Image: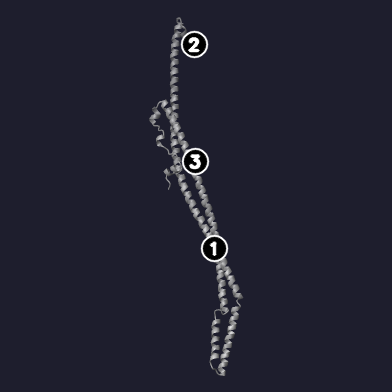
């Protein structure tokens, strides 16, 4: 699991220093002078802008990481689809291989049956018959036999020779057997080819499976980095929002102070006008009583509209 510090170092992110943040207490807001508040508003605005820029950079890197995560997920999905496609082909070749092996087994069973029908598994073998004939001929040549025994011995030799000839004829006439063996071997060879394809395709499917797992793992790692980058973005954005809120509060307070100053100026002007009016009325009363007015007194009467 990646940490925030590792993400900051890996992506060269400027860490947020709390010491650079600007604080605003209620006492500062309510009791600070206008000049102090204007200065504090500038500090809050500048820090807010710095934090917004920091948040924007972090959001951009987060979005880049999220895009890379989606790319890796798409890559993993492509490997998954290719793996599944190859596994389907593996199954097709397996089915065909098993079908051909079953067919080959049946053909080889027919071969064995044909061999048995041709002797080739029943009765005495050619070699056994040859040995028996040789033994009988040796006996004929070495023993003294009467006519009856001689005749019986010759009949046995002839009978053995006939059996030997029949056996040889069957063994020599193996064209049907050869064709059956060839067909069985061809089917077995075709089954082997499908088995080879099963092995090759299964290996490729495994490669795509491994690549899929790796892509998903990389996607998880990048997503973790994106999540940490989002936390860094939120950290900067929330700090920027706090500075903006304080900036707005200071601006509001400055407007209140402006209004207070304006009210004070209005009150001062009204008070001054009232004083000027009272003074002008006194001068006017003197004028009515016949006193001579100087230029300044005349200007005061003109200003208040009494002359």
Q: Are marks 3 and 1 in contact (CB under 8 Å)?
A: no
In the image, what residue occupies the spot 44% across and 16% down?
A: 272
Q: From the viewer's perspective, is residue 1 above or below residue 141?
A: above
Q: Tell me the SS state at disc 2.
A: helix
Q: Residue at x 50, y 43 (%)?
A: 64
Crowding at dot 3, Cα within 10 Å, few <14 / some 14-19 / many 20+, comes out as: some
- In three-dimensional space, the C-alpha distance between marks 1 and 2, rounded to whole angstroms, equals 120 Å
Q: Which residue matches tag 3?
A: 60
Q: Nearer the viewer, mark 3 or mark 2?
A: 3
Estimate the spatial distance between the alpha carbons at disc 3 and disc 1, rounded to whole Å. Answer: 51 Å
Is residue 56 positioned above or below 220 on the image? above
Residue 19 shows in the view: yes
Mark 1 vs mark 2, foreground winner is 1
Q: Is residue 213 left or right of residue 171?
A: left
Residue shown at the point (51%, 50%) measured from the top left: 73
Residue 125 in view in this figure? no
Q: Earlier in the sequence, mark 1 or mark 2?
A: 1
**What residue did someone put label 2 on?**
302
**Residue matched to label 1:** 196
Coordinates of residue 47 in the picture (x, y in percent) = 44, 33
């Amino acid at each position: 699991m990646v940490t925030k510090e590792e993400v900051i170092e890996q992506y060269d992110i400027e860490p947020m220093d709390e010491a650079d943040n600007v604080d605003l207490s209620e006492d500062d807001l309510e009791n600070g002078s206008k000049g102090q508040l204007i200065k504090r508003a500038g500090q809050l605005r500048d820090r807010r802008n710095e934090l917004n820029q920091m948040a924007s950079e972090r959001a951009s890197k987060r979005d880049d990481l999220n895009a890379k995560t989606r790319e890796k997920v798409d890559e993993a999905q492509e490997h998954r689809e290719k793996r599944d496609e190859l596994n389907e082909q593996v199954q097709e070749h397996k089915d065909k291989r098993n079908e051909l092996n079953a067919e080959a087994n049946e053909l080889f069973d027919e071969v064995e049956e044909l061999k048995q029908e041709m002797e080739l598994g029943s009765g005495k073998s050619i070699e056994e018959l040859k040995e028996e004939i040789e033994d009988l001929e040796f006996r004929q040549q070495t023993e003294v036999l009467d006519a009856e025994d001689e005749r019986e011995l010759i009949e046995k030799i002839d009978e053995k020779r006939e059996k030997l000839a029949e056996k040889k004829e069957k063994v020599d006439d193996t064209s049907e057997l050869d064709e059956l063996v060839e067909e069985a071997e061809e089917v077995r060879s075709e089954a082997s080819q499908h088995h080879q394809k099963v092995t090759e395709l299964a290996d490729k499917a495994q490669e795509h499976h491994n690549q899929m797992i790796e892509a998903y793992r990389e996607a998880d790692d990048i997503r973790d980095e994106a999540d940490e980058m989002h936390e860094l973005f939120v950290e900067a954005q929330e700090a920027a929002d706090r500075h903006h809120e304080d900036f707005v509060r200071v601006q509001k307070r400055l407007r209140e102070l402006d209004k207070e100053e304006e009210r004070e100026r209005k009150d001062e002007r009204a008070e001054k006008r009232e004083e000027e009016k009272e003074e002008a009325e006194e001068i006017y009363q003197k004028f009515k009583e016949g006193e001579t007015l100087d230029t300044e007194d005349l200007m005061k009467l003109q200003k208040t509209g009494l002359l």
